[in-house]
Image (spheres, rainbow, N blue to C red):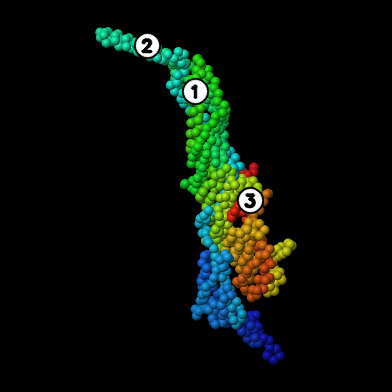
């Protein structure tokens, strides 16, 4: 007190710091009384409120860990509580009372709902004397899992429709444009060898042989009987033998013989046509200059052809050294056709039959050489070099925030296109240090859509033509969701919220007191109130489409919804809800935008975890339910759009995004 003791005697409020103040502990409440004051621990605390310490009561689920996976029908839940008097507390797990041991530990077995992927485990402690409650919550995922950063088997595909092969043709043709026919038919190549070019009209081979034999026999007789004239006889024999050769040659039917060689070879152009199963190589405007190398006749020959065409089938296989790439090991079943062969020759003598032989020889030589060229490493190297530039999956995944590897496990070719069937490995491209680290994602068993990505379905599911399709399983989309959570894409903090159809409204204590709970009015002096949303688990696609044709139903569990300001945390809620996922192509920018919204009949669950304002959980659930769809729409707006990659330098634009069997397909067309 203070005063004169006679007429005035005023009580000093030690709780306001008067009269020397108070010695109440932190987390204690000071209550002034006449001439004194009292200290008591705040609700939810226990200990020595005056000069000592008020410790918070505690509740923790120690097992299972938050976000753990289980395919068992039941799990064992373990936890512990911290309180001054364990007899004053009651603990429930999912509404079931549990016994708390002398050490504060408790255990209970819970059945998992296998029809629900997210199974919440909610523990609540109530302090009986004060009615104070604290809660803890973890979520067990009742599903098959796939490791984030591990292989998701048979989970993505690229379909290249046959129209897109025109672009591949252009690249390979640019490379082949510098080829030279002399590489196929080199100079001095012998097209005809040891051929008789000028025949003797009599063709009296038998007579010539007889004359030769007679002269030979006569000379040998002379040699045998005239040993002294050996030298002379030998000279005679040589002379006669020469004569015999000449006579025999003349009378046997051939006057001129020799070879025909290539002097020069040219063509006007080479054209490559690539289809999903066959490659055609055409040489146009062939011109070959020949020279006859004979013992007597001079002859220049020019042979031309409109075209020589080689057709070959091929098969694509994963590259053994890098299965994320593909290639042609060899072209096979080569067939060569010619068009418009003509000859023009200038010879000293009529060599018609010989020219025909030369033409046949040239055709056979070109056929053999073109066959060899089509099957050569040079040809397959040019095509494989172009194929190595094909990147569709990697840049799309990068646009979604993921570093990727897509080993090819199978390649299907048909008359309408090629399907590259791939496994998928994803990791987070740019992790946010403040975001949760996720190790597993939900794996959804789905049938790979080989049938839907074949010649039986040359159009999109909605009947539109397309050039390329990029197809993803729900398991891969779940990994993308996890990557985006790790990258902080779902983190959102807002200072205003949409209410109805009007403009967004600033968040104030008055607004929250009207919309949520009157107890928020106690924050009237607090500036800068905000709502902060932070995921603790990755959203999950469960293999179900939306009720109105949306691509997918997305389950979201244990999203932390905080009311915060510069003064700290004022309330924390864990929210479970359902979202709808769709994609939309922006025709102006060419980007693909994820669209997330809340179903009209969506039900949400909410657990009040941190409650400094002593809010009523039932009231919060009821009042927050209409706001959840608006907040989900804000959350969807935080997910980034992604650009479609170029296709061999051409811009791609989305034609349709729809389900392909169980998978989700992004169908695109080339432009530019």
| Residue farthest along the right direction in this orientation | 502
Above or below 422: residue 4: below
Secondary element under disc 2, as helix, strand or loop, is helix
> Residue at coordinates 57% horizontally, 69% vertically from top-left?
120
Percent x, y of residue 496: 69, 64
Q: Quadrant of residue 242?
A: top left
Of badges 3 and 2, the one in the foreground is 2
State the separation of the CA atoms marked 2 and 1: 33 Å
Mark 1 surroundings within 10 Å by alpha-carbon count, few (fewer than 14), some (14 through 19), many (20 or more): many
On screen, residue 41 versus residue 515, left or right, reads left
Cα distance between the residues tagged 3 and 2: 88 Å
Q: Residue at 55% across / 32% down in the picture? A: 309
Residue 56 appears in the rendering: no
Q: Is residue 6 depicted above or below 541 in this figure?
A: below
Residue that protrudes farthest toward the bottom in the picture: 6
Contact flag, marks 3 and 2 (Cβ < 8 Å)? no
Q: Give the number of the mark in front: 2 or 1.
A: 2
Residue indicated by mark 1: 358
Estimate the spatial distance between the alpha carbons at disc 3 and disc 1, rounded to whole Å: 58 Å
**Is tag 2's residue or tag 1's residue first in the polypeptide sequence?**
2
Secondary structure of residue under mark 1: helix
Quarter in which the N terminus is drawn? bottom right
Crowding near pointer 3: few (<14 within 10 Å), some, many (20+)? some
Q: Which residue is mark 3?
A: 461
Numbered circle sitting on residue 211? 2
Between 384 and 275, the one nearer to me in the picture = 275
Judging depth in this view, the residue of 92 and 275 nearest the camera is 275
Q: Earlier in the sequence, mark 3 or mark 2?
A: 2
Q: Please rate how many residues cluster around mark 2, counting C-alpha atoms within 10 Å: few if below 14, some from 14 to 19, many from 20.
A: some
Q: Give the x, y percent position of residue 221.
A: 29, 10
Instruction: Say which label, 3 or 1, has the lower sequence index.
Output: 1
Please indicate, yes or no, whether residue 338 appears anywhere in the rendered image: yes
């Amino acid at each position: 007190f203070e005063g004169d003791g006679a007429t005035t005697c005023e009580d000093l409020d030690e709780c306001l710091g008067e009269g020397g103040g108070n010695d109440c502990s932190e987390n204690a409440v000071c209550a002034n009384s006449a001439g004194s004051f009292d200290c008591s621990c705040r609700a939810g605390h226990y200990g020595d409120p005056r000069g000592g310490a008020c410790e918070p009561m505690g509740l923790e689920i120690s097992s299972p860990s938050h976000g753990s996976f289980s395919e068992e029908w039941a799990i064992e839940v373990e936890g512990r509580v911290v309180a001054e008097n364990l007899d004053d507390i009651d603990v429930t797990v999912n509404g079931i009372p549990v016994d708390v041991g002398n050490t504060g530990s408790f255990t209970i077995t819970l059945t998992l709902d296998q029809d629900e992927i997210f199974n919440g485990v909610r523990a609540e402690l109530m302090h009986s004397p004060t009615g104070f409650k604290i809660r803890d919550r973890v979520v067990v995922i009742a599903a098959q899992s796939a490791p984030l950063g591990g292989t998701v088997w048979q989970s993505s595909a690229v379909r290249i429709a046959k129209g897109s092969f025109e672009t591949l043709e252009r690249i390979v043709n640019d490379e082949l444009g510098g080829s030279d026919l002399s590489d196929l038919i080199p100079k001095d190549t012998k097209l005809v060898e040891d051929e008789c070019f000028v025949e003797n009209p009599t063709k009296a081979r038998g007579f010539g042989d007889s004359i030769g034999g007679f002269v030979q026999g006569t000379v040998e007789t002379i040699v045998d009987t005239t040993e002294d004239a050996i030298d002379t006889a030998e000279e005679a024999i040589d002379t006669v033998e020469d004569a015999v050769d000449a006579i025999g040659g003349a009378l046997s039917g051939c006057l001129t013989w020799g070879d025909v060689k290539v002097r020069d070879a040219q063509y006007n152009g080479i054209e490559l046509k690539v289809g999903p199963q066959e490659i055609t190589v055409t040489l146009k405007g062939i011109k070959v200059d020949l020279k006859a190398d004979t013992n007597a006749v001079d002859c220049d020959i020019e042979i031309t052809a409109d075209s020589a065409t080689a057709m070959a089938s091929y098969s694509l296989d994963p590259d053994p050294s890098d299965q994320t790439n593909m290639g042609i090991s060899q072209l096979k079943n080569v067939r060569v056709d010619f068009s418009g062969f003509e000859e023009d020759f200038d010879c000293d003598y009529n060599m018609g039959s010989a020219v025909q032989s030369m033409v046949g020889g040239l055709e056979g030589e070109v056929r053999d050489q073109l066959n060899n060229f089509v099957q050569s490493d040079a040809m397959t190297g040019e095509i494989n070099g172009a194929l190595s530039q094909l990147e569709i999956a990697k840049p799309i995944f990068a646009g979604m925030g993921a570093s990727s590897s897509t080993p090819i496990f199978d390649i299907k070719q048909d008359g309408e296109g090629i399907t590259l069937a791939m496994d998928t490995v994803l990791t987070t491209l740019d992790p946010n240090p403040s975001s949760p680290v996720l190790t597993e994602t939900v794996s959804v068993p789905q049938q790979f859509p080989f049938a839907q990505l074949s010649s039986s379905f040359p159009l999109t599911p909605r009947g539109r033509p397309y050039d390329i399709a990029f197809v993803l399983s729900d398991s891969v989309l779940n990994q993308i969701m996890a990557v985006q959570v790790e990258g902080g894409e779902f983190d959102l903090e807002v200072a205003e919220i949409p209410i109805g159809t009007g403009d967004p409204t600033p968040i104030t204590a008055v607004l929250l007191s009207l919309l949520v709970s009157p107890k928020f009015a106690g924050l009237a002096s607090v500036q800068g109130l905000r709502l902060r949303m932070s995921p603790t688990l990755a959203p999950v696609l469960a293999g179900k489409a939306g009720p109105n044709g949306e691509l997918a139903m997305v389950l979201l569990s244990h999203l932390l919804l905080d009311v915060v300001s510069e003064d700290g945390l004022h309330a924390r809620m864990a929210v479970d809800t359902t979202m709808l996922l769709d994609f939309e192509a922006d025709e102006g920018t060419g980007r693909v935008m994820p669209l997330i919204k809340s179903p009209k009949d969506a039900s949400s669950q909410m657990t009040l975890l941190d409650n400094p304002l002593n809010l009523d959980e039932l009231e919060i659930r009821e009042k927050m339910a209409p706001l959840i769809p608006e907040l989900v729409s804000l959350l969807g707006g935080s997910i980034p759009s992604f650009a479609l990659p170029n296709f061999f330098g051409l811009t791609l634009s989305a034609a349709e995004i729809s389900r392909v069997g169980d998978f989700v397909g992004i169908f695109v067309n080339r432009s530019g």
